[in-house]
Image (cartoon, rainbow, N blue to C red):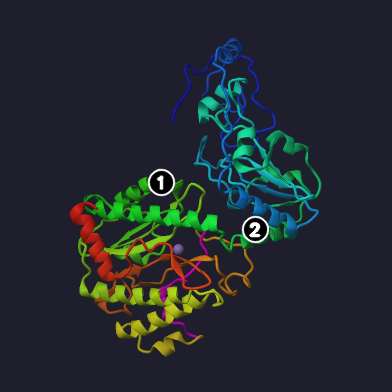
Amino acid sequence: MSDASGLPGESDTPSTPAQDTLGSDTPGAASHDTPGAASHDPDRPAALLEFMTTGWATREETLPAQHPSAPYRAARRAALAERFPGERLVVPTGGYKTRSNDTEYRFRPATEFAHLVGSAEPDAVLVVEPDGSALLYQAPVMDRSTPAFFTDRVYGELWVGPRPSLAATSALLGIDTRPLEELDKLSGAARVVRGHDPRVERLFDTDESADAELTEFLSELRLVKDEHEIGQLQQACDATARGFEDVVRALDRAKSTSERWIEGVFGLRARVEGNDVGYGSICAAGPHACILHWTDNDGPVEDGSLVLLDMGVEGAELYTADITRTLPVSGTFTPRQRQVYDLVFAAQEAGIAACRAGQDFLAPHRAAMQVLAHGLVELGVLDSAEEALAEDAQLYRRYTLHGVSHMLGIDVHDCAHARSEVYRKGPLQPGYVLTVEPGLYFQPDDLTVPADLRGIGVRIEDDVLVTAGDPVNLSAALPRDADGVEAWMRDLLRTGG
Ligand SMILES: [Mn+2]
């Protein structure tokens, strides 16, 4: 990170304010002598500010072509306007989140905003007016026409790079744009998607349950994916498959370091081919596989053990994959590992087969649990599958721990605010993309399981598109069955892929 401070403690010199309307709530924009400056920034004499704004070559602005996603997003905004006719609807993207002091996390647009607009600009706000027209309020560029271009750490061009103009954004996304400061002129009743931008929430007269209804509708609008979204999810799955291949090729380095090597290798693929990882990578070797969200990733990777990898690339438009493979570190399963693996695989096969339109959302879960419960008897873990499956007992869940499916999209656990009757208790519909991810987890100190199973954790997770016919596995590029996994690893380890 660059640090522009020269000599601290220079004399106070009046400086030109960057912009009044923005940044008061923006982390990193803490005002000292200049809005957008940090505590260690040196003061700037007026003569310097004047000098900095002159002597730059003129730039020609070429407007970009419209993005292929624009018509799809326009249709979503039209559906939103139709659901709440005559109302003002406000969807903020949110701003930078502070990591510590004046350093921020990388900006990630809010999911509702990403779905409806597709801009990556922080602090932007979509407003759908009562007549159904849509306006995007966005911070104007701070180019060399204002001293802010080199004083403002949040928007200044010399700090954060060139940002798109309102005209360029409008051309790219197919939506009318307004300067963000004009948002402050709005007031009165509106529904606002809460939780992303408190400043925007304070501008309007809102009602909590009316706002929740807006968020709920936008969550449900994402249940059925259109063809563009399915293409994005396929790309995310394909990039993720390449990331898994990278990891197998890098297993030797992981063995001489730790699980972190795997996390890093996959993260490299995610940043190069996508926006980032869609969630913290779970790189769980040996008994760490029994911890569902193991993200410390600081353990050893040892021959003879399994490594459970739950990782997903989030693509440029923020759609994420969510894939799990459990691999033998040596490239070959032991007979006992393979027995557990084959059982989880059979459960997943049953789950994927149940991903058919008209089945209810929990059908894949029930199908997989039937297989797992009966298999647990064969493994010598349970005495009776029927007893364990009984509604008032569900003892098998000691080893299966979690549900088999969730919706997938811009959020890894997508559509979280959808009503239960259309999601968890509703029917599967063509265009749904959900995970199928059964697992078995035998804790290292679980005295109810045979000693040679303790410390084994296996999960297999794929991303499945529901269609009018057979389910389509978007992550089929990665082998799932034990033989297929071994052959795939052998190939990558021998040839380097
Ligand atoms: Mn998942």
Q: Is mark 1 within 8 Å of ligand 1?
A: no
Q: Nearer the viewer, residue 408 or 94?
A: 408
Q: Nearer the viewer, residue 447 or 319?
A: 319
Q: Position of residue 278 (x, y in %)?
A: 46, 53
Residue identified by numbered label 2? 218
Is residue 408 a member of the stretch shown in magenta? yes
- Please identify the residue farthest to the top as the structure is shown: 47
In the depicted structure, whether residue 25 falls above or below residue 479: above
In this rendered view, identify the residue nearer to me: 302 or 479.
479
Image quadrant in which you'd find residue 60: top right
Q: Is residue 54 left or right of residue 311?
A: right
Boundaries of the magenta span: 392-410
What is the residue that sits farthest to the left in this orientation?
Answer: 494
Q: Residue at x 59, y 10 (%)?
A: 47
Which quadrant would residue 368 be assigned to in this image? Answer: bottom left
- What amino acid type should be assigned to the residue bearing mark 2? Leu
Q: Is there a contact, CB below 8 Å, between mark 1 and mark 2?
A: no
The residue sitting at 62% across, 65% down in the picture is: 418
Q: Which mark is drawn over residue 281?
A: none
